[in-house]
Amino acid sequence: MAFLQTTLKSGYITDLILPRPLEGQTPDEVLKAGLDAIFASVHTPNTMITLNPLVHEVKQLSPSDPKAVDVMSVAPIFGLAVDAPYAVLRDGENPALGGFQQFEILDKLNVMFGYTTDLTYFSAIRATKMGMEALTNAGSGVVIYGRWEIKVSGSPGGEGTSGGGQVINLIERNEIKTNVLLSWYIKASLDKSHRETHRRLKEKWLSAMRDAGYKS
């Protein structure tokens, strides 16, 4: 019933503070190392999916699988251009298909009193020049558009951070079309799990920077 449909929006920001340059390095070289480390995660769908604490299993699907997200139908709901020029395409990929990879995901959701339930849903994910985008069909009329962007704030040589004044900002925005009766539970579950996803992603980035020889 259309009159029971509602739209929810959410957003999350995580700051990745650049470490001090190694001996002989410039702040720009540190920035490149930091960007390479975060893009390595954000451009790997399996990594981004499994950082979510609710995810129990993930399986990649063929684009022709009948369970795959119908990108051509779902994208216009959010005003998203499938053939957007900022999509990162794999070799030989048709730009008209948008670079989306398809996944089947199993979440274990906490219901109450220690009980859990399984939720299987489907997501189409693509890498973009600024991060990644996902279109998710969660069933029961729930569809979600998620967008992750990586930006840089500050200026080389500025005050306030050990890395020369520059900070990598990891920005996530979500738009959810859902039944109003499900909206509270969806928003609460999304908020808790995505905050933890950001925390885990930051820890993964810090670990990658330490492996590259930088000190936190």
Image (tube, rainbow, N blue to C red):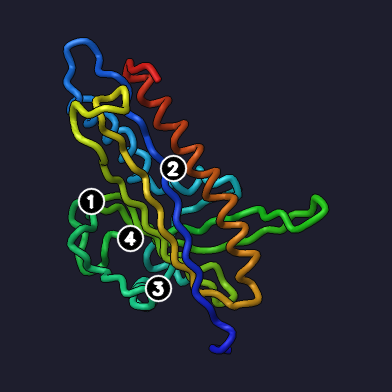
Q: Work out which residue is located at the far right of the displayed protein and give it.
A: 113
Pointer 4 residue: 100
Which residue is located at x 30 percent, y 52 percent? Answer: 127
Label whose residue precedes the other's in the sequence (2 or 1): 2
Label whose residue precedes the other's in the sequence (3 or 4): 3
Query: Label 2 to label 1, Cα distance in Å?
Result: 18 Å
Instruction: Tell me where residue 184 sits by quadrant.
Output: bottom right
- Local crowd at mark 4 within 10 Å, few (<14), some, or many (≥20)? many
Any part of residue 91 in sight: yes
In the shown orientation, is residue 111 left or right of residue 148? right
Could you tell me residue 141's position as x and y percent? 55, 77
Q: In the depicted view, which residue is nearer to us: 155 or 11?
A: 155
Inspect the image, locate mark 4, and give the three-letter code of the amino acid beneath it. Phe
In the shown orientation, is residue 189 left or right of residue 58? right
Could you tell me residue 216's position as x and y percent? 40, 20
Inspect the image, locate mark 2, and give the three-letter code of the amino acid beneath it. Thr
Marks 4 and 3: in contact by CB < 8 Å? no
Nearest-to-viewer mark from 2 and 1:
1
Task: Look at the picture and state if 13 lies above or below 68.
Answer: above
Query: Label 3 to label 4, Cα distance in Å?
Result: 11 Å
Pointer 1 residue: 129
Nearest-to-viewer mark from 3 and 1:
1
Marks 1 and 2: in contact by CB < 8 Å? no
Could you tell me residue 144's position as x and y percent? 46, 67
Label whose residue precedes the other's in the sequence (1 or 4): 4
Q: In the depicted view, which residue is nearer to us: 7 or 136?
A: 7
Residue 47 bears which disc, if any?
2
Query: Label 1 to label 4, Cα distance in Å?
Result: 14 Å
| Element class at badge 4 | loop
Inspect the image, locate mark 1, and give the three-letter code of the amino acid beneath it. Lys
The quadrant of the rendering that contains the N terminus is bottom right
